[in-house]
């Protein structure tokens, strides 16, 4: 048996790429290679009051054939990463797309076969603090479609502080994440405030109405969402610290493009296809798309 380490590439060392890198670093049988637009020498994670440091020694190294590539980009960042994806994905590279949104495979089929692609949802609120530390608010929960590829991915983690679930109905799980993150993301982004605003009854009602609208689209698209989902999301929302932000708000404040297409955008699009009215999400998209167009021009 070969003693060679498994070569893992992590593309996108932002919030989620940093959390995943820290978790994989626990496995000494892996060789980690990092790829990021802006050069970085360290990853710093703050979790449960402790600071963890991972040094990045192999950044943007294209000389190795990767066994796995974990893509931790936002959907709209895939386009600018095209050249990197061509270089990093070999015919045998297993590719994991870790992001929000639906139908992850669509963006990757031009690089590899569908059997090599694993869709992955992560629930792990993490935000960049001013001192360059990623603050991880919860233990990550990873959801994967039940498969051999998913088991292979699961085995990369020497399990300490991560919960990994393989599910039969991945579409439903993806929709639940889209419902939650698009409602929270858009409301915080448009109000310019953090989670404290949900102490206000009107804002909480807006969150619930947005969720209910999105659930109708999800159900029309074939997701099986339970009747108590909205109540469950409200309990979760109210458990967040008052200062919790959203990546949509943080991107807006930084003048970066917002992940609108994979969130509220996809809801309005599928709503139209399925004949489900989406007035709240339509309004969110109308209000945010101009900002997005401006920020995309600036960033490209
Ligand atoms: N953050 C959360 O709490 C959270 C929770 C659950 C799920 N998610 C989902 O996870 C996905 C990733 O989000 P994130 O929050 O980790 O995003 P992020 O913090 O913005 O990180 C993205 C990283 O990708 C890098 N990047 C962007 N374009 C690139 C390119 N063309 N080539 C190389 N590197 C590139 C960025 O580099 P720069 O350093 O140059 O910007 C950044 O480090 C999203 O779908 C998000 O919705 C996020």
Image (spheres, grey):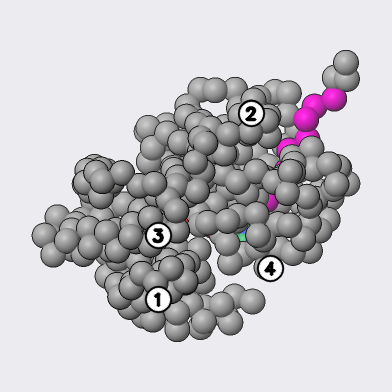
Q: What predominant SS class does the magenta segment belong to?
A: strand
* Residue 147 image point, x, y percent: 63, 33
**Disc 3 from disc 4: Cα separation:** 33 Å
Of badges 3 and 4, the one in the foreground is 3
Q: Is mark 4 within 8 Å of ligand 1?
A: yes
Whether residue 174 sits left or right of residue 4 in the image: it is left
Q: In the image, is the residue at mark 3 within 8 Å of ligand 1 by its beta carbon?
A: no
Q: Which residue is mark 1?
A: 285
Nearer the observer, 105 or 29: 105
Q: Residues within 10 Å of mark 1 (few under 14, many from 20)?
A: many
Query: SS of the residue at dot 2?
Result: helix
Q: Quadrant of the C terminus?
A: bottom right
- Can residue 3 be seen by looking at this rendering? yes
Task: Please give the residue where the numbered disc 3 appears in the rendered image.
Answer: 220
Q: Can you tell which quarter of the image residue 217 is in?
A: bottom left
Element type at mark 1: helix
Residue carrying label 4: 80
Residue range corresponding to the magenta coloring: 4-13
**Residue occupied by mark 2:** 151
Reading the chain from its start, which is encountered first: label 3 or label 1?
Answer: 3
């Amino acid at each position: 048996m070969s003693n060679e380490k498994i070569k893992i590439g992590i593309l996108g060392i932002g919030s989620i790429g940093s959390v995943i890198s820290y978790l994989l670093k626990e496995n000494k049988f892996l060789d980690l290679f990092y790829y990021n637009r802006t050069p970085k020498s360290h990853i710093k994670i703050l979790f449960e009051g402790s600071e963890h440091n991972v040094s990045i020694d192999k950044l943007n190294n294209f000389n190795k054939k990767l066994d796995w590539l974990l893509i931790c980009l936002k959907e709209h960042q895939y386009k600018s990463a095209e050249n990197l994806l061509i270089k990093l994905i070999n015919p045998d590279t297993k590719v994991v797309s870790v992001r929000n949104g639906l139908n992850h495979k669509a963006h990757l089929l031009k690089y590899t076969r569908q059997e090599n692609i694993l869709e992955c949802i992560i629930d792990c609120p993490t935000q960049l603090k001013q001192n360059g530390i990623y603050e991880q608010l919860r233990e990550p929960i990873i959801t994967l479609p039940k498969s051999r590829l998913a088991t292979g991915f699961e085995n990369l983690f020497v399990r300490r502080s991560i919960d990994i679930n393989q599910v039969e109905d991945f579409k439903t799980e993806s929709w639940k994440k889209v419902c939650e993150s698009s409602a929270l993301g858009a409301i915080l982004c448009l109000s310019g405030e953090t989670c404290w605003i949900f102490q206000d009854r009107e804002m909480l009602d807006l969150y619930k109405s947005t969720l209910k609208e999105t659930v109708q689209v999800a159900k029309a698209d074939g997701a099986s969402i339970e009747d108590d989902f909205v109540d469950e999301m409200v309990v979760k929302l109210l458990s967040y610290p008052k200062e919790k932000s959203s990546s949509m708000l943080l991107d807006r404040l930084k003048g970066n493009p917002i992940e609108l297409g994979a969130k509220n955008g996809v809801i309005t699009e599928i709503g139209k296809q399925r004949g489900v009215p989406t007035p709240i999400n339509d309004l969110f998209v109308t209000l945010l798309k101009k900002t997005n167009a401006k920020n995309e021009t600036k960033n490209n």
